[in-house]
Amino acid sequence: MRRPLIESAWEGYADIVELLLEFDCNINKSDKFGRTPLFVACLLGKSEVVHVLLEKNAMQSLCDENKQSPLLVASRGGYDNIVEYLLQENADVNLCDLKGNSPLLVATSESPLSTVKLLSSKINDFSKCNLQGQTPILTATIHRRIDVLQYLLPFCKEHVSKPDNDGRSPLFIACKKGYSDVVQLLLSNHADLSQLDWTKQRSPLFIAAAKGHADIVNILIRNESKINQCDEEGRTPLFVASEKGHTSTVKILVESGADLNITDQRKCTPLYAACRRGFIDIVKLLNENKANITKFNKWNTSPLFAAYRQGYLEIVKYLVENRSTVTGSDYFVTIPSLVASENEKTEIVNYLIQNGTDLNQSNQCKKT
């Protein structure tokens, strides 16, 4: 059951709130969720009630069970008249909730720009992070707040590349999400193109290529991003774009001079990755640009082997027609027709036999 003062604040009955206070109701008494009358009025945007309570010296620093202050919830709601009044009464702009979110951090993600401006006027340190390591610039990036970024960047250019706890910079996040307008804005403010995330050592270009954001890949390359920068597995942007089937992205990378034959830690090439995943258009594009069509990986298997093992007849035919060898074996001494027959890929078996597979070769189990 709500207390009368909290109930009146909830409904926005400023006159009843004032009357109850004259009868010495406890102005700072909270409900079971830790919500005071002032908190409730700020949460719901009841500005008249807020004025009455502050005039009667309600405590602004009392937070709810999640450590949310009245200023924070008013900021989240975009109630500028309440935010302004709280600031005039010296509300603490640095008071954070249980997740480490300050009123400004909350406002940069979901409130009007006017709210951000009010809070910024009282902020000295724009590098303050929440428990995830997110700055106001990063939270604005996550939520694609172009207006907020344009306003905040002049105040905190030195934090434009400050990463979160996983090493993800605002530019990395914008590239991952496909926000080309945010990417351009961050680059115009000297965001670091070479900064890698800490979990997998991925560059902004790598993550843009992995997600197939061709327009962003173009922007990053024009801004001289390192086109062959590898992640922790040794994969280049071209490799991951080929592996994911992003043809337009692959085309841009190839035309921009990406190395077609850099291998990952398993010695697989981008062409091998495309064959294994069945992306015929990418296979053709890479081959037409002189990718090594017969390069073996660490297990001594070729792109052709990857294609027929997965059952991609169209790719098998294309590779054979382009002089990829049909005979030969992998690390386990397994020839193409044997693998195809073991996987019941009759059509590929017949095609391989017609094109010169030696039926007398066997694997290490002596199977022919």
Image: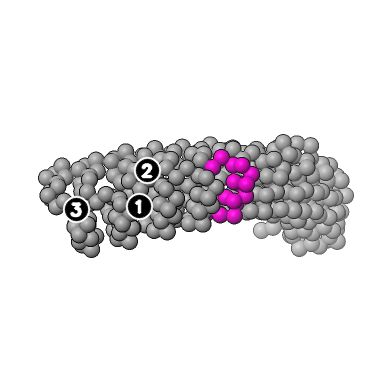
247 and 358: which is toward the camera: 358
Residue on which the image places disc 3:
357
Q: How many marks?
A: 3
- Give residue 338's position: percent from left, percent from top: 18, 52
Tell me the residue at 27%/53% (across/down). Answer: 309
Q: Is residue 84 magenta?
A: no
- Give residue 335's position: percent from left, percent from top: 20, 48
Q: CB atoms at circles 3 and 1 under 8 Å apart? A: no
Q: Earlier in the sequence, mark 3 or mark 2?
A: 2
- Give residue 35's position: percent from left, percent from top: 70, 51
Q: CB atoms at circles 2 and 1 under 8 Å apart? A: yes
Alpha carbons under labels 3 and 2: distance apart: 24 Å
- Give residue 57's position: percent from left, percent from top: 85, 46
Q: CB atoms at circles 3 and 2 under 8 Å apart? A: no
Which quadrant of the structure image shows residue 234? top left
Q: Secondary structure at mark 2?
A: loop
Label drawn at residue 276: 1
Q: Is residue 313 visible?
A: yes
Q: Amino acid at mark 2?
A: Cys
Q: Secondary structure at mark 1?
A: helix
Q: Is residue 206 visible?
A: no
Which of the two discs, 3 and 1, sits closer to the camera?
3
Which quadrant of the structure image shows residue 43? bottom right
